[in-house]
Amino acid sequence: MTALHYLDANASQPLRPAALDAILAAFEVAGNPSSVHRAGRGVRRILEDARDVIARGFGGQPQDLVFTAGGTEADATAIHAMSAGRRLIISAIEHDAVRSAAAGAAILPVGPDGVADMDALEVLLSAGNPSLVCLMLANNETGVIQPVEQAAAICRRYGAVLHVDAVQAAGRMPVRLDMIGAHSLAISSHKLGGPAGVGALLLAPDAPFAAPLVGGGGQERGRRGGTPAVALIAGFAAAVQANEADDPHRLATMRDAAEQAAQACGAVVCGDPKNRLPNTSCIALPGTAAGVQVIALDLEKIAVSAGAACSSGKVQTSHVLQAMGLGTLAGEAIRVSLPWNVTEADIDAFASAYRRVADRLRATLV
Ligand code: PLP
């Protein structure tokens, strides 16, 4: 049986072996980290060690890290906790995790390269209302890296608060809240090789936090109620540490090879080709629907995704590519995102499958 070539890391990364070991070891330890007895203290040690690794790994302090049930909850918590009395401004390319929590927000436009317009941010903020701005660090569909340091400086000049969704950037490029200068950062474990269902919101020491999204028993210093998923959190921390040993050039070289093979078949790369995550490529094949390409590649045992696949599995036209003004190409782009354990055999398989698929789909166009 031919192997499956998994090139959909931005949907979810394969679990790191070190993360699995840490999860299994933590599951062996019984107890609730809030209990005062010896058993509880043992579990609490696992939790606090993980908090330390993750907070410091992303340029923050352990007491400012709030564990959540994933990236979606981290984004929703940031918006819920920091938007009181503030007008919301979100970039046009935010993930649905932000968009769905920010109804009625003003939209910050992006250019054809997929980069948010900082002049427009300045214009929006100069209206003078207190604001909460959401700008992601790297886009999940194009991989394009956003000018978050510049956005943070502008926000601070106008007294605005900045939340950065770093879900796709974390583990693929250096990410430090203290260097960015934002007020908060959302991170998700399964996007960096840890288990799904756990994530974190890292707050800057001066972040305003009016009220938790999930109340309950006052866990996480009153910022997120509920018993934390300690074994998953241990796996999350182990994945963060494992990522530090990765070589981003290895991924970028393989990503470029996959992209060149597609371009040789007439495909177009979407978004700023230089300022991107090393593992992500968004490639449109003019005249062929993204969903058809995904299915044709799946039949070739290549797993990629269309711009945005909702949870029902239906392919929708990408709001990200539409915001970049790509017109019909917005419905014709697939996302190839390389996992940490990608091999040259995966890239070779992709290149030859893409050639076959492009030839076949092109033949049906005439
Ligand atoms: N933010 C971005 C940019 C994402 O790509 C995703 C997931 O695709 C999320 C947030 C949501 O993360 P999670 O799946 O952990 O809820």
Image: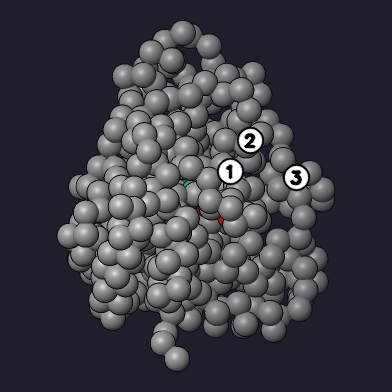
Q: Position of residue 353 (x, y in %)?
A: 32, 72
| Residue linked to disc 2 | 101
Secondary structure, mark 2, is loop
| Residue linked to disc 1 | 97
Seen in the picture, residue 222 relative to 188 is either above or below; the reply is: above
| Residue linked to disc 3 | 214
Q: Residues within 10 Å of mark 1 (few under 14, many from 20)?
A: some
105 or 76: which is nearer to us?
105
Seen in the picture, residue 233 relative to 342 is either above or below; the reply is: above
Seen in the picture, residue 300 relative to 201 is either above or below; the reply is: below
When asked about the image quadrant of residue 31, the answer is: bottom right
Task: Determine whether, in the image, residue 356 is placed left or right of residue 221.
Answer: left
Secondary structure, mark 1, is helix
Separation of disc 3 and disc 2 at Cα?
14 Å
When asked about the image quadrant of residue 28, the answer is: bottom right
Q: Amino acid at mark 2?
A: Ala
Separation of disc 2 and disc 1 at Cα?
7 Å
Q: From the viewer's perspective, is the residue at label 3 or at label 2 nearer?
A: 2
Q: Residues within 10 Å of mark 3 (few under 14, many from 20)?
A: some
251 or 226: which is nearer to us?
251
